[in-house]
Image (cartoon, grey):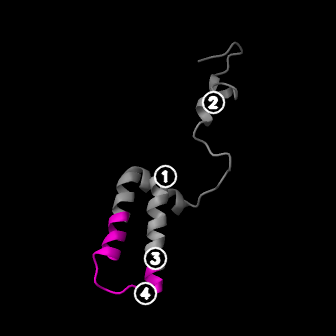
Amino acid sequence: MQTSKGQGDELNPSADTAGNTRNVSKVKVWLTPSQSEFIEFVLFYGASELSKSLKLVHDMALYHSDISINADEKRALFSVKCLWEGVEEI
């Protein structure tokens, strides 16, 4: 679509600003290539499916295992819990 000056709306910063910035964070964070690849994987695979899988692995290790869990393993399970909760928010 062209404006009266012959420029497209994509060049007009005020055109549909609310629609374009609705899901954009106000904090600019630069991602490393591996972080970007991980986010792409999560979005491709499905955040809810990945979250369910992480929760299942956590619960299997914690509740369906007869082995004792040491402090390092407890921290790792807590990290998995934080990860699945974070993925749920995506």
Q: How crowded is mark 2: few (under 14 residues within 10 Å), some or many (20 or more)?
A: few
Distance, label 3 to label 1, CA atoms, is 20 Å
Q: What residue type is labelled 3?
A: Ala
Residue bearing mark 2: 18
Q: Residue at x 43, y 55 (%)?
A: 42
Distance, label 1 to label 4, CA atoms, is 29 Å
Asked if the magenta segment contains residue 72, the reply would be yes
Does residue 44 sit above or below 67 in this rendering? above
SS class of the residue under badge 3?
helix
**Closer to the N terminus: mark 3 or mark 2?**
2
Residue 39 in the image: x percent, y percent?
48, 55
Q: Which amino acid does label 2 sit on?
A: Ala
Compare residues 78 and 45 and report the one nearer the observer: 78
SS class of the residue under badge 2?
helix
Does residue 30 sit above or below 67 in this rendering? above
Q: Residue at x 46, y 59 (%)?
A: 85
Give the residues drawn in magenta, as a range: 55-74
Residue bearing mark 1: 89
Q: In the image, which is nearer the foreground, mark 1 or mark 4?
A: 4
Distance, label 2 to label 1, CA atoms, is 22 Å
**Closer to the N terminus: mark 3 or mark 1?**
3
Q: What residue type is labelled 1?
A: Glu
Residue 87 in the image: x percent, y percent?
46, 57
Residue 67 in the image: x percent, y percent?
31, 86
Asked if the magenta segment contains residue 82, the reply would be no
